Image (cartoon, rainbow, N blue to C red):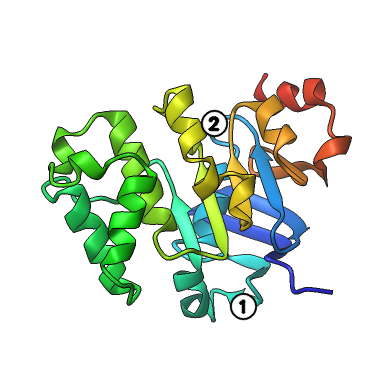
Amino acid sequence: MAEPAIALEGLERRYGERVALHGVTLRLQAGATLAVLGPNGAGKTTLLRVLATLLRPHAGRAFVLGSPLPDDGWRVRGRVGYLGHDPLLYRDLSGRENLAYHARLHGLEPRRVDELLDAVGLGRRAEDPVRDLSKGMVQRLAVARATLHDPDLLLLDEPRANLDPAAAEALEPLIGRASGQARVLVSHDVDRALAEADLALGLRGGRQAFCLPAGEVDATAARELYA
């Protein structure tokens, strides 16, 4: 059997005395999609940041792309694409300059930058400073940054935020199921998240409410997490 993209056993993360994640256990196969559901403050973003090696777990076991965290986090950072609430772009640099910087970090050829700018529909605005772009354009550029290095695992926190339907559809080859990568998808859109996921994790107050094949999750019950 292929190595799982993610394996968690009793994962815990704290902020001081506050427990942000407690007892999270799951296994996501390579190429599969995990939908993470829950209200604000449930621990969804914290989970993504742990998987992205931006936060250290405090207890339990966590493996990403076969490497244990935090000890071997350095092995997987170049294989993970992270799209969070912060676009992680330099506002005074142009879109092209931002992507060129990340391309150099990953040892990529400059032509990859042009390919991604065209893929997200920003070829004509490539020289504009990020501060002059609309929220939707910034989100598209952030998608280009996160997928520039063709990662094996995509960590996506509300990836369609600020996008109109046409823009969201255009990004599907990069961040949708068609991308072929393993994905962790945080979303408040329960129905859509379940429709495009293989596995669904429900969080409430940092604790695991359920972890089931997405087809076995009752959408009405999942929405009760947000009540």
* Picture layout, residue 142 above or below residue 114: above
Q: Residue furthest right?
A: 216
Q: Residue at x 63, y 56 (%)?
A: 180
* Percent x, y of residue 210: 80, 41
Crowd around label 2: few <14 · some 14–19 · many ≥20 (10 Å): few
Residue at 49 percent across and 55 percent down: it is 49
Q: Position of residue 149 (x, y in %)?
A: 42, 65
Residue at image x 30%, y 67%? 103
Residue 95 x, y percent position in the rendering: 21, 49
Mark 2 and mark 1: Cα distance apart in space: 29 Å
Q: Give the class, few, some or many, for how many residues have Cα within 10 Å of label 1's Cα (few <14, many ≥20).
A: some
Q: Looking at the image, can residue 43 be seen?
A: no
Give the structural element (helix, strand or loop) at label 2.
loop
Residue type highlighted by circle 2: Asn
Say which quadrant the N terminus sits in. bottom right
**Camera-nearest label, 2 or 1:** 1
* First reached walking from the N terminus: tag 2 or tag 1: 2
Q: Residue 218 location in percent, x, y? A: 84, 27
- Residue sitting at 50 percent across and 80 percent down? 75
Q: Quadrant of residue 176?
A: top right
Q: Is residue 195 left or right of residue 78?
A: right
Lateral position of residue 84 relative to residue 17, left or right:
left
In the rendered structure, the answer to whether residue 188 lies left or right of residue 119 reads: right
Q: Regarding mark 1 in the picture, which secondary structure is present there?
A: strand
| Tag 1: amino acid | Ser
Residue annotated with mark 1: 67
Q: Are marks 2 and 1 in contact (CB under 8 Å)?
A: no
Which quadrant of the figure has residue 196? top right
Q: Nearer the viewer, residue 213 or 128?
A: 128
- The label shown at residue 40 is 2
Q: Is residue 144 above or below residue 190?
A: below
